[in-house]
Amino acid sequence: MSIGLRLVPPPIQLADAPAPNWHHIVRLSDDTGLLEHARNGIVRREHGYCVDDVGRGLLVASREQRPTAQVVGLAERYLAFLTHAQGPDGAFRNRMSFDRRWTDEPGLGDWWGRALWGLGTAAARSTVPWIRREAGVAFRLGARQRSPWPRAMAYAGLGAAEVVRSDPHDNDAAELLADAATAVGLPGPDPAWAWPATELTYANPTMAEVVIAAGDLLGDESQLRSGLRMLAWLCREQDNAGHLSTVPVGGWARGRPKHRFDQQPIEAAATADACATAIAVTGDQRWEEPLFRAIAWFLGDNDTQTVMYDPLTGGCYDGLTADGPNVNQGAESTLALVSTLQHARTLVTRSATRPSGGLA
């Protein structure tokens, strides 16, 4: 007989975050690149490859400070895919079928920006000299272009920021970073809507992050403050009773009620990225709280209190619905998980060096 007790799960701790797991990324990769989709944990070859995900793959692999030989091999493969996708003017094709046929022409959509983000990160951070050199060549070719879409520019700007951090005298990267921040814009004076646009759609934290990076690296204090204000406001907007509730598919518009679903792992990962950049730029430990909430989103502290990854495969579920997760484990979502767990690993290390022990 029930006695009416409700078991309350213990609060999530930073120590609960597992180490980044590359097993499912390896499962989705072949000798050509990174396949886009999976049903459950099994790759769906019929959907082929896209530069969007391969660029993300190179980005995340390049962030590994001590990559295994397997991760280095993945980075080489992804870099080769991106250089094959790039046209002579620096634009990129996006989609390749499983039989290695490109199905589109080079363009400057989000995939161009994500390719440059991955290439810039590889050029600046890879531990492998020949990867750094070739990524730098492809980045510089792509950096000649400018996209008419602000989010594409924001992704490209983050790649440029990586290059400027490693070489402050790289004028081409600095110009791209400045143009990216300009494309995003600055928030208006109304504290109730501290955003440059009237809607929040996708990759919102990335927009704030590139403004923060530009303000920091290009020496514009006003721009830096504006980017931090954008991110702080967005983190408050995405707070729901103390946990992260990301802007869902369909977005949020000013003056309209918020809907909560469907949420995408890439949005939680973008929040983690932006907060990690804010910490690095300001040294302010208060940004660790929203970073931790982005990590905890994957561990189950979300709107349905559901763990968002499969510990057996290492794959991340593709979305959070009102009924729980979409259990397909595609490349975008799994890379979002690995990227966020990289931040968790860094946060654990930082917290362990403090006398107080840092976050729980």
Image (cartoon, rainbow, N blue to C red):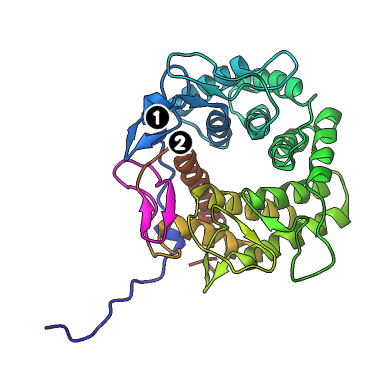
Figure label count: 2
Q: Residue at x 68, y 51 (%)?
A: 277
Q: Amino acid at mark 1?
A: Leu
Q: Which residue is disc 2 drawn over?
A: 331
Element marked by disc 1 = helix
- The mark that comes first in sequence, 1 or 2, is 1
| Magenta span of residues | 306-326
The relative height of residue 306 versus residue 9 in the rendered view (above or below) is above
Side of 262 relative to 236 (left or right): left
Seen from the viewer's position, the closer of residues 23 and 328 is 328
Q: Count neighbours of disc 2 (C-alpha within 10 A) and say few if under 14, some if 14 to 19, many if 20 or more.
A: many
Q: Quadrant of residue 191?
A: bottom right
In the current view of this chain or complex, which residue is farthest to the front?
256
Label 1 close to label 2 by CB (< 8 Å): yes
The relative height of residue 286 versus residue 340 in the rendered view (above or below) is below
Residue 168 appears anywhere in the view = no
Q: Count neighbours of disc 1 (C-alpha within 10 A) and say few if under 14, some if 14 to 19, many if 20 or more.
A: many
Q: Position of residue 324 (x, y in %)?
A: 37, 58
Q: Is residue 310 magenta?
A: yes
Q: Residue at x 65, y 18 (%)?
A: 86
Q: Which residue is disc 1 drawn over?
A: 28
Element marked by disc 2 = helix
Q: Quadrant of residue 186?
A: bottom right
Seen from the viewer's position, the closer of residues 341 and 249 is 249
Side of 31 relative to 85 (left or right): left
Q: Position of residue 139 (x, y in %)?
A: 71, 24
